[in-house]
Amino acid sequence: MTTTMAPNETLDRRSAVRVGSIVIARHGKPHADRSVRIDHHGYRDWWAGYDLARLHPDEKPPEKLVAHAQASDIIYASTLPRAIHTAEMVAGGRQIITDPIFIEAPLPPPPVWGRRSPRAWGVWARVAWWFGRHEDGETRLEAETRAEAAVATLTAQALRGQNVLLCAHGWFNRMMRPILRAQGWREVEDGGDSHWSYRRYEKLK
């Protein structure tokens, strides 16, 4: 049997006590018209356009989130334009790593009668998806598995001592929270769930 000594760098990392923090942010307000009233066909088209939208021209990031970005060693974003634009606005020209693993969970609208606002359709669609309606898209179970993989992507860096910032999406961010808690990550800042909100996590000792 041959035994190989690990490199000094690896040994140093194993003995290091510092663990980085994880900041998970929701994107800023997208440039999309929420005042329209549409049927479920119209909402499907509206959501497709929403997924192509960047942020509203008047959007500005909060100073605290910019400060967290400055303190981060790695900045992630989903591959959707609203998340990338959010990351660009806080990154100050630094590199952003985009990954589709962080995109929002799908919102296929149920075929119910009536014209509603996009916000109302979002609620109907999320409830229907949560209870099993997914059409030919990602199921809830598949999204939960993806959330586990997304958390693994973030924690792999934080456990190496890197401060990590993710700019992603409201519902998918929620899906990652119980996974982080179960793995011993404590929420030390709760910024809510609105646009530009964020939550910061640290590993329990």
Image (spheres, rainbow, N blue to C red):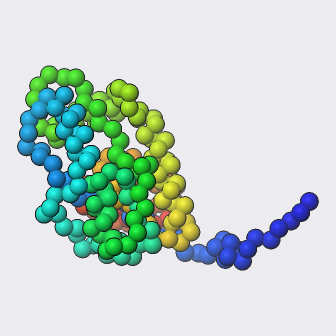
On the picture, is 17 further left or further right than 119? right
Residue 198 % position (x, y): 31, 61
Vertical comparison of 12 with 39: above or below: below
On the picture, is 22 further left or further right than 117? right
Residue 159 % position (x, y): 55, 66
Question: Which residue is pictured at 19% across the width and 38% down the height?
Answer: 46
Question: Which residue is pictured at 11% across the width and 46% down the height?
Answer: 33
The answer to which of 95 and 184 lies nearer the viewer is 95
**Residue 34 occupies which quadrant of the picture?**
top left
Can residue 69 be spotted in the picture? yes
- If the image is split into quadrants, where does the C terminus sit? bottom right
Q: How many marks?
A: 0
- If the image is split into quadrants, where does the N terminus sit? bottom right
Can residue 68 be spotted in the picture? no
On the picture, is 115 further left or further right than 125? left
The answer to which of 147 and 33 lies nearer the viewer is 33
Vertical comparison of 134 with 31: above or below: above
**Residue 120 occupies which quadrant of the picture?**
top left
Question: Which residue is pictured at 34% across the width and 46% down the height?
Answer: 104
